[in-house]
């Protein structure tokens, strides 16, 4: 009888700890980059003409967004 009660108590303790870890307060403070426009098709230009287009990056997260590198394709 004591063994059953002890086993049940251990199982309840394990489940309680698991629930506390799984459903505890989560930190959602992460950056989230959003690009309204990901592709821009340039029109033909003469050799030597300057071509400029600005891509907008929006941070939809809760923490600062840091852009480390930008590469052209």
Image (cartoon, rainbow, N blue to C red):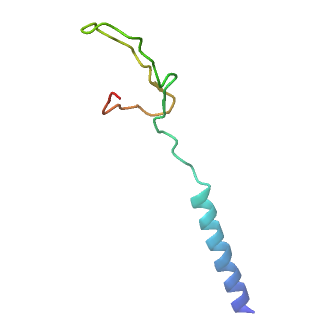
Q: Nearer the viewer, residue 40 or 34?
A: 40
Q: Position of residue 52 (x, y in %)?
A: 34, 12
Give the quadrant of the N terminus: bottom right
Q: Residue at x 31, y 33 (%)?
A: 68
Q: Quadrant of residue 20?
A: bottom right
Which quarter of the picture shows residue 70? top left
In the image, is residue 60 above or below residue 3?
Answer: above
Q: Is residue 37 left or right of residue 14?
A: left
Q: Position of residue 39 (x, y in %)?
A: 47, 23
From the viewer's perspective, is 70 left or right of 2? left
**Seen from this angle, which residue lies furthest left?**
48
Residue 18, relative to residue 8: is it above or below? above
Q: Residue 25 appears at what percent x and percent y?
A: 57, 49
Extreme right residue here? 1
Residue 30 image point, x, y percent: 47, 39
Question: In the image, is 45 to the left or to the right of 39?
Answer: left
State the quadrant of the C terminus: top left
How many callouts does the rendering have?
A: 0
Q: Quadrant of residue 15?
A: bottom right
Q: Residue shown at 34%/8% (left/top)?
A: 45
Image point (71%, 91%), residue name: 2
Q: Nearer the viewer, residue 36 or 12?
A: 36
């Amino acid at each position: 009888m004591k063994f059953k009660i002890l086993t049940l108590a251990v199982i309840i303790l394990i489940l309680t700890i698991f629930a506390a870890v799984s459903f505890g307060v989560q930190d959602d403070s992460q950056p989230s980059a959003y690009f309204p426009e990901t592709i821009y098709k340039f029109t033909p230009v003469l050799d030597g003409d300057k071509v400029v287009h600005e891509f907008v990056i929006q941070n939809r997260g809760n923490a600062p967004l840091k852009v480390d590198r930008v590469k052209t394709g």
